[in-house]
Image (cartoon, helix red, strand yellow):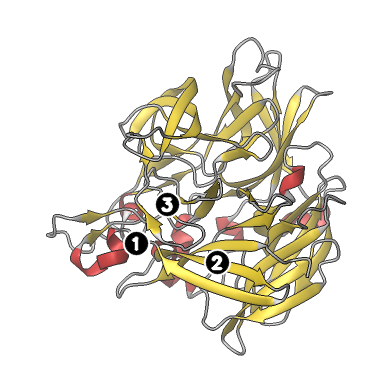
Amino acid sequence: KSREGVVHYRVLPGYFPKGMSYHFDGLATVMKVEFVNGSFLHVTSKIFESAAGKSFESCDFFGTGTGPTKPLVPHICFQNPGVNLLPVGEDNLWLTIDTASWGQMNPKTLETLPGKVDTKVQTLNAHPACDHDTNECFVQHPCDVSPLSRNICFSRLLEAESGSNGDLKLETFANAKLDKSVLLQHSHSPCITENFLVSKVDRFTFRNPLNNRSGLLKFAKQAMSNEWMVTSRPSATRKVGPAATRILRSNMSFVNNHFSNCFEDTENKRIVIDLVGVTDRYLDSYFLNELQNPAQWGTTFTPAQRCYVPLEGDEAEVSCEKLLDGKEGELFFDYPTFNPRWKSKSSSRYVYAIAGKPASKWFDSIIKIDSKTRSIAKTWSLKDTYVTEASFVPRPNHEAGEDDGWLVSVIYTEGSSSSQLLFLDAKTLETVSTHDLKEIIPFHAHGVSCLPTEGGKKKCFANP
């Protein structure tokens, strides 16, 4: 009964046209899960009607690892925002990706809407940095239109005025210069605190095109780097030293896959960030020929890190170290989640993730990390069962402990070749309920949840 009115959304690579051999190029589809009368689970899904979603066979599709599918066809299909979701109010659900080709759906009907982001830059963030209290979201991106740029910016996402070219626009308030121009600069998952914004400044690099890849990854791959950007929020009461924006370097090079929670450590004048880093071959691991083999954890992921971003003085190095102690530090995990009501709080203790042991073929467990003791507090797993992101759903109209809520994951059972929706108690990681789904749900990245409020409206939380 306590889940009455909870709505959970997932974005999936839901449709794979013939010949598509890159997993996350599957055409973006949104799945909506609702609890009705306290127990009945209502599940609907719809494909995002991009040009490729409406008529894949009549266009030249070019994705991360697919295409060009029809080089002689003049109509290029590039939009396929199948990585994350960004709820904006009650009436807009944005499908996001690290390019600027986001998409818009009606969260009630899952009808595709025509909205776009009114910008000429080529990359944005699949995970905008959002403040759930002020309802602000920020993105980090190149300042220039060119795919090669050394100028990088932070902007606030705003709903565009009537008559604008898109339904979202960028209001740039911070910029900085790198030492040299980089290709397709992006930051998959910037983070936000009360006063600051931080991004890991990632980029692509050209590769020898004489390979068996397709799409963008035939010509370029992600590059491991150590540059960071930190800037003060427009409303900040504290600043980043004498300047509002700084470019810093860390003692390690990696690609940031996902920041977890981050917070200000005022006593030590720094920001503390836990993160999941990957190597330059991470994106290649989602080609079909790679997925047919057991996961190569050690060459795809770096150990999870805790990084310290200095805020004052002459110190210009971001110091990173292993997040977990002892043998647990060798465990590979990804897709970190946490209670959104504890976002940016230094008192936050718990992070949830999906994990794989060195011998695991894929992500096969859900873990609860105690970030204060830097250890794994709880683990859930089931034989021959694989998991997806364990999204945290706070209890509606109820603010108790940080781990008072549920985790929801779409799981796949190998023996029965079936998918289920799994609900766990976030405190104990004990199973609350499972619900059979009528079809196999492909592995996917992220979900968002909306909770009922006393006023009858929904309170939606961005991921993370």
Image coordinates of residue 306 in percent, x first then y, are 72, 41
- Residue 265 image point, x, y percent: 79, 29
Marks 1 and 3 close (CB-CB < 8 Å): no
What amino acid is at disc 1?
A: Glu
Q: Secondary structure at mark 2?
A: strand
| Residue 356 in sight in this render | no
Near mark 3 (Cα within 10 A), the count class, few <14, some 14-19 or many ≥20, is many
Q: CA distance from mark 1 to mark 3?
A: 10 Å
- The kind of residue on which mark 2 rests is Lys
Q: Residue at x 51, y 72 (%)?
A: 44
Q: Give how far across and how far down residue 305 sits, in percent.
A: 70, 44
Q: Are marks 1 and 2 in contact (CB under 8 Å)?
A: no
Query: Could you say where residue 65 lies in the image, as x and y percent from the top left?
Result: 36, 59
Q: Earlier in the sequence, mark 1 or mark 3?
A: 1
- Give the left or right position of residue 106, taking residue 242 as reference: left
The image shows residue 190, relative to residue 440, as above or below, that is above
Q: Few, some or many C-alpha atoms within 10 Å of disc 2 (few <14, some 14-19, many ≥20)?
A: many
Residue 395 visible? The answer is yes
Dot 1 corresponds to which residue? 49
> Which residue position holds label 3?
104
Q: Is residue 54 left or right of residue 40?
A: left
**Residue denoted by label 2:** 32
Dot 1 crowding, Cα within 10 Å, few <14, some 14–19, many 20+: many
| SS for callout 1 | loop
Question: Eyeballing the image, is 262 above or below 349?
Answer: above
Looking at this view, is 174 or 383 the one in front?
A: 174
Q: Amino acid at mark 3?
A: Gln
